[in-house]
Image (cartoon, helix red, strand yellow):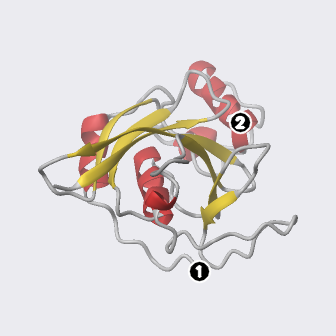
Amino acid sequence: MPRYYEFEVTLQELEPRIWRRFLLRTTSTFADLHAAIQDAFGWQDYHLWECRLPHPLDRVLAGSPNYDGDDWGRPTPDGRTVKLDTYFVGRWALEWCEYEYDFGDSWVHDIKLIGVHSIKEAFKRRLLDGARACPPEDCGSTPGYEELVRFVQTGEYHDPDVDIAAWLGDWDPERFDLDAARPAFDRPRKRGKTD
């Protein structure tokens, strides 16, 4: 019978909370977890990423292929080769780790292991729940996101020469439509080379 990790992933620093919950096969890699987070939140997979143990350990578990590590010399194991069960099973099993996407905007997510389930039905992954819209890609981290939320609420933006409404389209920070998101998540998109 197939086994699945149930993960809950929450963006740090933002209130009200932006989160997603999903199932992922226990045979998956950290690259599969990265792809699930990208698709669950609606990120576009434009930037480098890594999964790590949080401060004070700051140990990188896995990350973008061919990324040599940061300025402090921490090596980054290729996420395509590191299985989730390396860290999420056994006596010293992780209960949570961090996922950082886009080292410029630095979107840090908490990944919490909720449980491990055996399910008769076989699938790769399944989106279960979530709340609120993900920040738009390249919006300028938490301060930029908060400015976009203010714009949606008030119509005011700091730069009158920028057509922020056209850039945002119909983005609404409160909207997360599980029924619309689930089919695309449950049938993952094909990804190009990440090198």
Which residue is drawn at the image coordinates 84% and 69% (left, top)?
73
Q: Secondary structure at mark 1?
A: loop
At label 1, the amino acid type is: Asp
| Relative horizontal placement of residue 52, taking residue 159 as reference (left or right) | left
**How many marks can you see?**
2
Between 121 and 67, the one nearer to me in the picture: 121
| Relative horizontal placement of residue 102, taking residue 193 as reference (left or right) | right
Disc 2 target residue: 142
**Residue 69 image offset from top left, x and y in percent:** 76, 70
Disc 1 target residue: 195
Q: Quadrant of the C terminus?
A: bottom right
At label 2, the amino acid type is: Thr
Between 8 and 48, the one nearer to me in the picture: 8
Residue 170 in which image quadrant = top left
Characterize the local packing of mark 1: few (<14), some (14-19) or many (20 or more) Cα atoms within 10 angstroms: few
The vertical placement of 14 against 43, above or below, is above
Which residue is drawn at the image coordinates 87% and 64% (left, top)?
72
Answer yes or no: is residue 47 visible.
Answer: no
Q: Quadrant of the N terminus?
A: bottom left
Label 1 vs 2, first from the N-terminus = 2
Q: Secondary structure at mark 2?
A: helix
| Relative horizontal placement of residue 128, taking residue 33 as reference (left or right) | left
Residue placed furthest toward the right: 72
